[in-house]
């Protein structure tokens, strides 16, 4: 049985609560996207925005010092700025992060090798035979050395 998500919206301090049914094909994410607390009463006043762009321009949300773990188990701290709702997308977060960008490049390289193995029957057969696999590894090392020497 599907569960309904209901959001309660207070229209006025003295008014009764209004109830909004939240569609199941949508995502709602609520969090504090800035490390600074409100500095004055004007920040506590209701902000009336006509668009999401106005909300992002007014509050300028960012998250500083997000701890990311490296492959070696160390920590890297990076900052993320949010200028539109698209900035919460995986691709945008990866683009903002040096560590995540490097990891994505490795994943893309591994996926390219996997696709090549799936398509190339000769290469698959070469990797099955131990002697042929050794010869291929030697050839690849020589090619890598030549590329490093010419770089």
Image (cartoon, grey):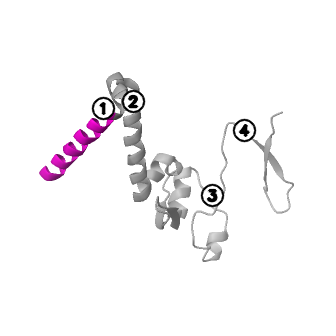
Q: Which residues are magenta?
A: 131-151
Q: Residue at x 87, y 54 (%)?
A: 16
Labels 3, 2: front one = 2
- The Cα atoms of the two marked residues, 3 and 1, are separated by 69 Å
- The Cα atoms of the two marked residues, 3 and 4, are separated by 23 Å
Q: What residue is pinned by disc 3?
A: 48
Q: Residue at x 42, y 58 (%)?
A: 99
Is 61 above or below relative to 7?
below
Decide: few, some or many residues near mark 2? Use Cα within 10 Å; few <14, some 14-19, many ≥20: few
Mark drawn on residue 132: 1
Residue situated in front as seen by the camera: 73 or 105: 73
Q: What residue is pinned by disc 2?
A: 128
Is 106 above or below relative to 56?
above
Labels 3, 4: front one = 4
- Tags 2 and 1 in contact by the CB under 8 Å rule? yes
Residue 74, x across and y down, in percent: 48, 67
Residue 134 in magenta? Answer: yes
Residue 45 in magenta? Answer: no
Q: Earlier in the sequence, mark 1 or mark 4?
A: 4
Q: Residue at x 84, y 53 (%)?
A: 17
Mark drawn on residue 23: 4
- The Cα atoms of the two marked residues, 1 and 4, are separated by 57 Å
Is 41 above or below relative to 19?
below
Q: In the rendered view, does 110 fall on the left or right side of 19?
A: left
């Amino acid at each position: 049985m599907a569960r309904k998500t209901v959001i309660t919206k207070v229209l006025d301090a003295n008014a009764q609560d209004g109830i909004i049914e939240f569609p199941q094909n949508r995502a709602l994410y609520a969090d504090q996207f800035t490390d600074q607390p409100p500095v004055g009463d004007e920040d506590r006043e209701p902000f009336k925005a006509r668009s999401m762009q106005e909300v992002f321009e007014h509050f300028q949300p960012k998250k500083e010092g997000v701890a990311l773990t490296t492959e070696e188990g160390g920590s890297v701290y990076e900052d993320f700025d949010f200028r539109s709702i698209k900035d919460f997308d995986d691709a945008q977060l990866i683009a903002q992060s040096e560590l995540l960008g490097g990891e994505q490049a490795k994943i893309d390289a591994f996926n390219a090798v996997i696709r090549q193995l799936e398509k190339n029957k000769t290469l698959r057969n070469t990797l099955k035979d131990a002697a042929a696999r050794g010869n291929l590894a030697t050839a690849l090392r020589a090619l890598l050395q030549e590329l490093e020497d010419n770089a």
